[in-house]
Image: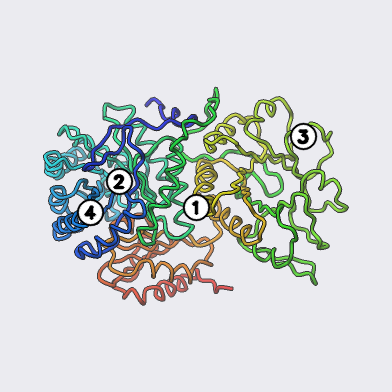
């Protein structure tokens, strides 16, 4: 297969796709990137669903997705649509279907778009391995053809669009047996349905490849685009989303890493940020993501490397030599910027996880203590504070004691210092624009590069830089400065720009600056750095939560429960806990989790250890205690400090 995806890796250009009509609206083609969200109310509660939809519309949602798990909910979509129209809201509705073809066929006659999941529309998932030869597998395709054709005909005759939405967590046993739990399996699952649609000359289609792991999600979408580009299939618009992203900063970070990486490639025509929060909180975050690309084609052009030593379809960490605790097999480090703070006190240090005892002249680190402190021109007033400290070069030269103190040298000054640098470790700050001169000089072995870019197309420019320095093995810290930007935007921008690079194998550390003049601001940025590394799956410093955004299928208070579980287990570093509203994607998306808490009925949940069911029909209000007891039974519990 010819690699055509490299065309998306350098200079920004939005992928060309069909324009697909969704009622009076349209996506793909020359249409703007659209934003959607999904209701969490019981679909049978017309008024609650309408009220929630209006809040979503007012917060920026251009499409409203509503679950229809059975025929009754599908029929009630007509009442919801009418009530919205009566109130002056003629917005396209999307029916979300799992397991129930009859519900899909009813919904397709009412709403503007129907989303089906190839993993459970005509198949099932029970984690069984099935042996197929070509004949038996083709017979399964024929069975699916017969099952999905009625829906296709209804959509075609009613002008209804269809989203073929693959979920990593709900790949069928058939697909898993044939292709494994892989991005390729996700892609093939969708392409089987797509070929059936095209055989019916039905093209009003949107595709998606959602996963809770941003890396899997990115690889699946990229592979889908590559497969379609190398086939006779039409180029359909794509809906982007990281499923089960979670709540708070974690949910925003994980979503931005996955969605932002693809938007940066020019991929994506609709976006949903899935948060375990009220759905009206989702569109504003999606808007922050999408708005960055409205004028992105105007960025400074990037020179395409002659040799492209990067695969967009698989993770491969850039190899670098180890210098102290940076590079090699070390996890990426975090540098915290304290250069703008006027006075460093023990209370300030405590805010970023450094507990310094003046009397004992010793300090204790926590899991989210920065690995290095950048002080710029500032000085530390404490004796024997042997933390890893980085100073501006001229300040470093004037220090009486240089123990655990290292210089930051601007690239423009590098040729002037005449070997007057640390014999242990040095930091060289440079810009991607310095690349040509960098190639002409010899960088000492004990130098760590800190790279930044002034290009609006930041991620691509930094990625290109890494390709251009393939002969260097010095560790590289990725740096960006987000001054005069709201913190909510910094979360999204940095998670895209820097997190998007870490999931592609680039970077030995993270360094973020902003208007950090107050310790509370520094504390937030320090925490953000660690969360970006965790969301990128390159450094774990806290419990990893996989939690769904809730919908009308959820029969307990998911937001309250998620908060309770997080409050009581967030200190369990390295554990992965899945918190799922129902069984649609739950067992699959949390298949690599240590423990799972999954809705299974009215106010009832099921507890999992890995993929194994441990307890069924647990009353959800007792579920958190039962989960903690299970963790204790396994010897994985640690009392919080």
Q: Earlier in the sequence, mark 3 or mark 1?
A: 3
Question: Is there any visible trace of residue 330 in the rendered image?
Answer: no
Q: Are marks 3 and 1 in contact (CB under 8 Å)?
A: no
Horizontal and vertical percent for residue 435? 65, 29
Q: Secondary structure at mark 2?
A: strand
Residue 84 position, x and y percent, is 21, 56
Q: If you read the primary sequence from the N terminus, does the residue marked by circle 4 or circle 1 appear first?
A: 4
Q: Which mark is in front, 3 or 2? A: 3
Image color mode: rainbow
For mark 1, what is the residue?
Answer: 535
Q: Position of residue 475 (x, y in %)?
A: 65, 41
Q: Upstream in the sequence, badge 2 or badge 4?
A: 4
Q: Secondary structure at mark 1?
A: helix
Mark 4 lies on a secondary structure that is: loop
Q: Earlier in the sequence, mark 3 or mark 2?
A: 2
Q: Is residue 420 visible?
A: yes
587 relative position to 408: left or right: left
Q: Secondary structure at mark 3?
A: helix
View extreme (top): residue: 306
Please name which of the two marks, 3 or 1, marks the residue nearer to the observer: 3
Tell me, yes or no, whether the two marked residues, 3 and 2, touch with CB atoms within 8 Å.
no
Q: Looking at the rendered structure, which numbered label has been put on residue 88?
A: 4
- Sequence-wise, the earlier of marks 2 and 1 is 2
Q: Residue at x 82, y 47 (%)?
A: 395
Q: Residues within 10 Å of mark 3 (few under 14, many from 20)?
A: some
Q: Earlier in the sequence, mark 3 or mark 4?
A: 4
Q: Mark 3 = which residue?
A: 414
């Amino acid at each position: 297969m010819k690699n055509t995806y490299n065309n998306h890796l350098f200079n920004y250009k939005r992928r060309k796709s069909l324009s697909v009509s969704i009622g009076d609206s349209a996506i793909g083609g020359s249409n703007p990137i659209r934003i959607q969200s999904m209701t969490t109310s019981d679909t049978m509660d017309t008024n609650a669903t309408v009220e929630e939809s209006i809040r979503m519309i007012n917060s920026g949602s251009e499409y409203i997705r509503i679950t229809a798990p059975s025929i009754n909910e599908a029929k009630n979509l007509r009442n919801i649509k009418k009530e919205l129209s009566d109130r002056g809201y003629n917005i396209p509705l999307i029916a979300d279907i799992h397991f129930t073809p009859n519900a899909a066929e009813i919904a397709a006659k009412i709403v503007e778009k129907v989303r089906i999941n190839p993993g459970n529309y005509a198949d099932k998932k029970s984690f069984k391995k099935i042996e197929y030869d070509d004949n038996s597998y083709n017979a399964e395709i024929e069975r699916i053809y017969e099952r999905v054709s009625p829906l296709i005909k209804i959509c075609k005759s009613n002008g209804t669009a269809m989203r073929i939405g693959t979920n990593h967590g709900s790949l069928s046993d058939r697909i898993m047996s044939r292709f494994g739990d892989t991005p390729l399996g996700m892609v093939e699952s969708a392409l089987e349905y797509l070929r059936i649609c095209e055989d019916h000359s039905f093209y009003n289609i949107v595709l998606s490849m959602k996963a809770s792991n941003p890396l899997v999600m990115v690889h699946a979408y990229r592979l889908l685009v590559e497969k379609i580009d190398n086939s006779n299939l039409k180029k359909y618009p794509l809906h982007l989303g990281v499923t089960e992203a979670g709540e708070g900063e974690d949910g925003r970070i994980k979503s931005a890493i996955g969605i932002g990486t693809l938007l940066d490639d020019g991929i994506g025509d609709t976006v949903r940020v899935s948060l375990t929060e009220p759905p009206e909180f989702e569109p504003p975050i999606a808007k922050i993501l999408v708005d960055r690309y409205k004028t992105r084609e105007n960025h400074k052009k990037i020179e395409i490397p002659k040799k492209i030593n990067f695969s967009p379809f698989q993770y491969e960490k850039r190899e670098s030599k180890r210098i102290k605790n940076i590079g090699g097999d070390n996890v990426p480090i975090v540098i915290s910027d304290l250069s703008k703070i006027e006075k460093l006190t023990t209370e300030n240090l405590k805010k970023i996880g450094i507990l310094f005892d003046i009397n004992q002249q010793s300090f204790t680190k926590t899991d989210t203590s920065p690995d290095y402190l950048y002080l710029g021109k500032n000085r530390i007033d404490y004796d024997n504070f042997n933390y890893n400290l980085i100073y501006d070069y001229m300040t470093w030269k004037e220090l009486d004691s240089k123990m655990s103190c290292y210089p930051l040298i601007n690239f423009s000054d590098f040729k002037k210092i005449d070997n007057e640098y640390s014999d242990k470790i040095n930091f060289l700050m440079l810009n991607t624009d310095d690349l040509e001169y960098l190639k002409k000089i010899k960088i000492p072995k004990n130098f760590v590069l800190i790279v930044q870019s002034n290009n609006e197309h930041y991620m691509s420019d930094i990625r290109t830089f890494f390709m251009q320095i393939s002969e260097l093995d010095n560790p590289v810290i990725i740096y960006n400065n987000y001054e005069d930007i709201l913190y909510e935007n910094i979360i999204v921008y940095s998670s895209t720009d820097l997190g998007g690079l870490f999931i592609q194998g680039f970077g030995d550390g993270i360094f973020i600056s902003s208007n950090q003049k107050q310790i509370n601001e520094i504390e937030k940025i320090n925490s953000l750095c660690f969360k970006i590394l965790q969301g990128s799956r390159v450094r774990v410093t806290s419990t990893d939560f996989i939690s769904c955004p809730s919908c009308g299928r959820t029969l307990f208070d998911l937001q309250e429960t998620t908060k309770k579980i997080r409050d009581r287990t967030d200190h369990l570093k390295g554990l992965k806990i899945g918190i799922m509203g129902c069984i649609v994607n739950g067992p699959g998306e949390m298949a690599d989790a240590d423990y799972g808490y999954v809705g299974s009925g009215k106010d009832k949940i099921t507890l999992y250890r890995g993929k194994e069911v441990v307890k069924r029909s647990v009353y959800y209000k007792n579920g958190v205690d039962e989960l903690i007891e299970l963790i204790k039974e396994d010897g994985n519990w640690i009392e919080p400090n």
